[in-house]
Image: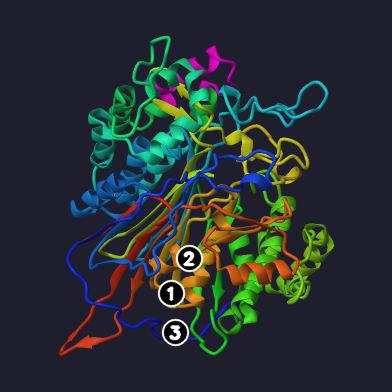
Amino acid sequence: MTSSSPDRPNLKPLRATFGAIAIRVRPLVLRLGLTMIASALASSPVPAIASVTSPASDPQPVRANTGMVTAAHPLASQAGVRILQAGGHAIDAAIATALAISVLEPYSAGIGGGGFLLIYDADTREIRSLDFRERAPIAATSEMYLDADGVPTTDSRSGHRAVAVPGTVAGLYEAHQRYGQLPWAEVVQPAIELAATGFEVGDRWVQSLNWRASTLLSNPAARAVFSREGTGETPQLYGLGDRFIQSDLAATLRRLAVDPEDFYHGQTAAAIVADMAANGGLMTQADLEQYEPIWRDPVCGLFQPQRANPEQFRVCAMAPPSSGGVHLLQMLTLLEPFDLAHQSATQQQHLLIEAMKIAYADRAYYLGDPDFVAVPVAELVSSAYLDRRRADIEPDRARSAAEVQAADPALLRRITMESRDTSHLSVVDGNRNAVSLTFTVNGGFGAGIVAAGTGIVLNNEMDDFSIAPGVPNLYGLIGGAANAIAARKTPLSSMTPTIVTDTDANLRLVVGSPGGSTIITTVVQILLNALVYDQNVATAIAAPRLHHQWQPDSLRLEANFDPAIVRDLQALGHSLVTGGQWGNASAIEVIPANATQGSEPFTDYLEGATDPRGQGLTQGF
């Protein structure tokens, strides 16, 4: 990756003609949206799924002329397109889609959580990013999850003490204030309707509920929401095809449609604070009142997919307190000189795995909230540093995790002188404004609690801090002092909302995924598939995935990975765990105008796809 490049020609020819409206519902897969790093971890964040459907052999993207929304649930995509067709900006549609997900998938994301978004402004051709991640309560301390003997407890994963201050409502409203074109109440309305009138629950919803049922049923407010007879002695959980109505949440959303500050200063805030006080939680009125989303500069770099082709792309993703952008760019920069398009299939995967190990080792040591610790972003993504790390990659041998260490601080100083359950959505509007948004409540159904009287599922985001040195979180990730708990600090994240442009700053690709610790590696594989191997977005997303996060020292491969490559990787010394699938990615690509039909030139058009591992929908017009 370099700092400058020549003008690039159009990458791809027109693939096909397109219709006015194209809709595809991806196959329903009996698979949770949380990452499945399973038996390699001491504690798996998701249940094992008995049956997993393989992606289609030749998936094709949805095509549209004007605007497009991809989201994890069909009704959420429809909510977003409804707003686009009403004249909304991409940010209006993103807000409507996100709030709909909050109603439809309370196990993955919601207004009781937080996240990040990137926005591409078609007028200025600039990319900005907004951090609306949860923050630690004022009363939080670095040892709050250690018992008297210094042994970690499980309080960071379930219950009121696991909850960090939510940021979703504040973040969405802040983005709307800056970019929105429709009234705030109008973009909230689809979510209100879904909560008030309900929807039929599907397999994924029921599986998620059954997996977390014991925790949810132990909280009276959650029990009242998620069992059909919540006040009875014997709860009856919702089943497949049941209509799920959330009256309390609908009332909350109606208040927020009138005044989004109600979440932090009004009736909703009071209900959350009262629930916290009654159940030993740390969050107070002061925590809610002091919450503010933060506009941050994204981390960006240039990527040249093939040595023989001078075309380059500018890849932008979320900077700290997300680790996604830093390590996405690290991996792309490490891999660029290898010219992957001309490597064997086994070498392509081997080199990628070794780059993953380096990136995740750096993540464990250096990454944290930049408002509290100095994160050497420029140094970690610099060519000077990564040229040195690339030399450590051995083409014919897998290095063990013990052989891969984080960057030497002295080396970084010299370089300075030299130069998991989550949901993702993508939106592109008719003016080519774009939003890549990833948000979460962390684990399935967050902390497994509902703030009484609000219908809001609250996050367990405190688990994303380093509870103690060397102690893995819900996703098996190891952290250090940079990610230690502190009052009002933001926990480290792997969320990687990403926007790619050409070197003339024209929008090319909007992409992201849920999946806990696998988010970064999922996004990098989609980018490599699309940019290096020239796959359409549907194929790029559907392709089998692998994941290595340095610790634990095991390579996970999806069940449908090529057996020959699996054997070859094992022969190189990789310790393999095969089976299952993870992630629920989506992407929209802008196909540039590069052909004519008679005397009329084609305009650019959109190709989009959601993950066959999930139940999402891509809708355009």
| Contact flag, marks 2 and 1 (Cβ < 8 Å) | yes
Which callout, 1 or 3, points at the residue further toward the start of the chain? 3
Which callout, 2 or 1, points at the residue further toward the start of the chain? 1
For the magenta stretch, what is the residue range?
264-285
Main secondary structure along the magenta-highlighted residues: helix
Where does label 2 land, which residue? 543
What element does badge 2 sit on?
Answer: loop
What element does badge 1 sit on?
Answer: loop
> Please, is residue 501 above or below residue 159 in the view?
below
Residue at 84%, 62% (x, y): give it.
410
What element does badge 3 sit on?
Answer: loop
Which quadrant would residue 434 be assigned to in this image? bottom left
Where does label 1 land, which residue? 535
Gap in Å between the C-alphas at discs 1 and 3?
A: 19 Å
Which callout, 2 or 3, points at the residue further toward the start of the chain? 3
The percent position of residue 87, horizontal first and vertical second, equals 20, 54
Gap in Å between the C-alphas at discs 2 and 3?
A: 27 Å
Where does label 3 land, which residue? 8
**Residue 312 placement, left or right of 436:** right
Mark nearer the viewer, 2 or 1: 2
Which quadrant would residue 248 be assigned to in this image? top left
The percent position of residue 594, horizontal first and vertical second, equals 30, 84
Of residue 26 and residue 164, the one placed in the foreground of this image is 26
**Residue 319 placement, left or right of 21:** right
The answer to whether residue 267 is magenta is: yes
